[in-house]
Amino acid sequence: MTPEALLDRSLLSVEYRTVSYVTGPLVFVENVHNVAYNEMVALVLPDGSERSGQVLEVAGATAVIQVFEGTRGIDVDVTRVRFLEEVAKIDVSPDMLGRILNGTGKPIDGGAPVIPEKRLDITGSPINPYMREQPADFIETGISAIDGLNTLVRGQKLPIFSGSGLPANELAAQIIRQARVKSGEEFAIVFAAMGITHREAAYFMQQFESTGALERVVFFLNVADDPTVERLLTPKAALTVAEYLAFEKDMQVLVVLSDMTNYCEALREVSTAREEVPGRRGFPGYMYTDLSNIYERAGRIKGLKGSVTQLPILSMPDDDITHPIPDLTGYITEGQIVLSRHLHRRGVYPPIDVLPCLSRLMNLGIGEGKTREDHRAVANQLYAAYAQGRDLRRLVAIVGEEALSDTDRRYLHFADGFERHIIGQGDSGRTIEETLSIAWELMSELPIAELKRVRDFIDKYHPTAGGQAGA
């Protein structure tokens, strides 16, 4: 059937046999009519099997289609292409909690099919700025370096910058196990794994199943040998489910995206196949816009109880924080958590280097009634004392520890204790009260005169001042 013979697409399904070119995950179809950008496509192979795809670009009468299951075996002479007149959608339901899905949202855990309550467009729509509610209240991750010094706030997007070989996956699994909100509120986690190895996938499944965390997790799994194009849909499908649970089911939802570097590499691969002019490091110039479309789907909406909070994880190539992926991510998001190779080599876990870390919205989620009244002051004091201790380490390498004053030696020992007891907590979780109590114990090693940032709380929380025990 040729396009010229068709009079009305609404009455008759359109099939084309005008595939002209196949390159990488892309198929070029000529002489198309009334085809829309992002429209879903079915490709029928000679053996009768079907593959799904999506219109990536329409130029005149030529449509460029990205094929989700790969283009191997596609014969340009006999493959039929059918345009489905709808955009990419995903079936959503509260029953998705506890399920393992592929990158496009289809169950792969051997369980029964998900009975959909709705079918939603995965592209989503940005939150109207006028309707955005300011992020507030914190999500307790159980990680002292995050909860105490770089608090994650509901509605925030706070990325974790990792490097090759650093335990980002272990940290992600630990946060998913331990994260919680106020009692009485429904909490869910949407975890999207993109381009991970089968070994990493097995690790996550074992962790979730053995700890019971899977019951509150919707797990999207795209492994390294899955189609590249499917990787581009994974975060969008995950965020669609998160928005449904948050804004229609009134849940507090934490979205963990790992690894955004694999997503960006897939974006570059498709861009190269389209023969687009490359930008910095070969990535497409529109990568900033693409990442914004993902990250800006976090937030809260006025009048609704739920929230979507994002914790994207990305690996910095060559540990380069100026690489386009972490660089653009830092522009869009509200801070960063940075993992340190130096701390990792010293056996500190989780190896979070708090000095370059930042949570720009921290003050909105802490304080009396949310965490504790002294939280901000304690974080400031810890940061200042640790920074001074780090500076003294460099000085000791030149002049030796004997040249230091007694106060300087205390700061030096404080830096060691901070890394052992605050940062290096191991794989056990802590409440915010426990984190602050350990912080006061550490600060008690410094002269009280040096605790300028917490002076208003010394009488109440200092373990020795005034003979009172720490709270």
Image (cartoon, rainbow, N blue to C red):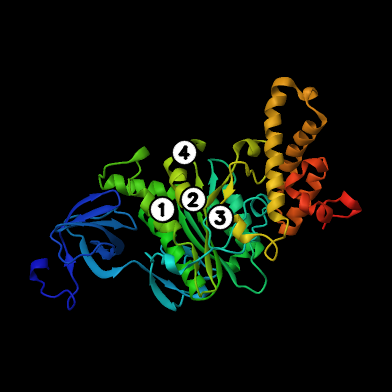
Q: Which residue carries the number 1 mark? A: 291
Q: 315 left or right of 324?
A: right
Query: Residue 364, how many percent across, how many down?
Result: 60, 60
Tell me the residue at 78%/45% (across/down).
443
Q: Is residue 398 left or right of residue 297?
A: right
Residues marked 2 and 3 touching at CB (< 8 Å): no
Q: Contact (CB < 8 A) between labels 3 and 4?
A: no
Amino acid of disc 3:
Ala
Secondary structure at numbered mark 1:
helix
Label 2 element class:
loop
Residue marked by disc 2:
259
Q: Earlier in the sequence, mark 1 or mark 4?
A: 1
Q: Closest to the observer: 352 or 402?
A: 402
Residue 339 — which label? none
Residue 106 in view in this figure? no
Q: Which residue does the numbered mark 3 point to in the structure image?
A: 202
Measured in 3D between alpha carbons, the distance from the residue under mark 2 to the one under mark 3, in whole angstroms, is 16 Å
Residue 177 visible in this rendered orientation of the protein: yes
On the image, the x and y values in percent for residue 236 come to 41, 61
Tell me what residue is drawn at x 67 percent, y 38 percent.
Answer: 387
SS of the residue under disc 3 = helix
Q: CA distance from mark 4 to mark 2?
A: 17 Å
74 vs 147, left or right, is left
Crowd tier of the residue under label 3, counting other residues whose Cα lies within 10 Å: few below 14, some 14–19, many 20 or above: few
The outermost residue toward the right is 467
Q: From the top left corner, tell me how far across and down residue 429 is, in percent.
A: 70, 56
Q: Earlier in the sequence, mark 4 or mark 2?
A: 2
Amino acid at dot 2: Asp
Which residue occupies the foreground of this view, 305 or 113? 305
Give whichever of discs 3 and 1 has the lower sequence position.
Answer: 3
Mark pair 3, 4: CA separation:
32 Å
Calculate the distance from the C-alpha at mark 2 to the C-alpha at mark 1: 13 Å
